[in-house]
Amino acid sequence: MLQARPDVFNCSETSMKLTALGTPVENVARHEETHRAIESLWQELLVPVESKFGAIKVTYGFAGHELVKAVRRRARELGRLPSVTPSRDQHAGHELNTRGKPVCVRGGQAVDFYVPGHSSLDVADWVAANLRFDRMYLYSATQPFHLSWSANPLGQIVKMIPKAGGGVRPQVVQRESPITHGD
């Protein structure tokens, strides 16, 4: 049986932390196309994953301007590099910047998630073999992975390879290759 739909607006570590401190971040999708993309992502990708593996845990979903600012500010305060790239990561959906241009020209919508009790790489292998997605970014078997939907899915799989000294190097993986090999 499918679990209740997870909150894609207030699921990030930063959002939850600031809410617990009594200073919640406004994270609202203002454009109807973003809401439609979230619904499509849910129906086309997340429902099938839940049907196969069980309840998912979304760790980063929709990211509006205020949330992105809060994530960057919190990363600086913690001495980390912010790991958000709104112009490319699809977490902003179809939202517009202050100049009226799309925050991310890729459109669609993305979430980062994992399935408790399952390797993210095993889940990703199943997604790659069975679903039409836009982009997938993989970090490790134990970390959430990024999955996006768009009306014209690219089906691109990218492994994020840790670099010495921090950060990651993206490596595109051929879709026909098992994702879990070499990890």
Image: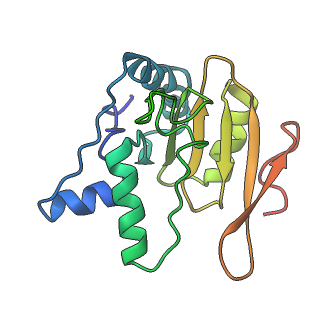
Residue 169, by quadrant, is: bottom right
Name the residue located 51 percent from the left edge and 29 percent from the top edge: 101
Q: Position of residue 180 (x, y in %)?
A: 77, 54
Name the residue located 58 percent from the left edge and 46 percent from the top edge: 146
Q: Nearer the viewer, residue 123 or 28?
A: 28
Is 159 placed left or right of 45 in the picture?
Answer: right
Is 10 placed left or right of 120 in the picture?
Answer: left
Residue 23, by quadrant, is: bottom left
Q: Position of residue 4 (x, y in %)?
A: 30, 32
| Quadrant showing the C terminus | bottom right
Give the vertical position of 124 relative to 155 (above or below): below
Give the vertical position of 30 relative to 166 (above or below): above
Name the residue located 43 percent from the left edge and 21 percent from the top edge: 39
Residue at the extreme left: 22
Q: Is residue 132 visible?
A: yes
Name the residue located 48 percent from the left edge and 20 percent from the top edge: 43
Q: Position of residue 140 (x, y in %)?
A: 65, 61
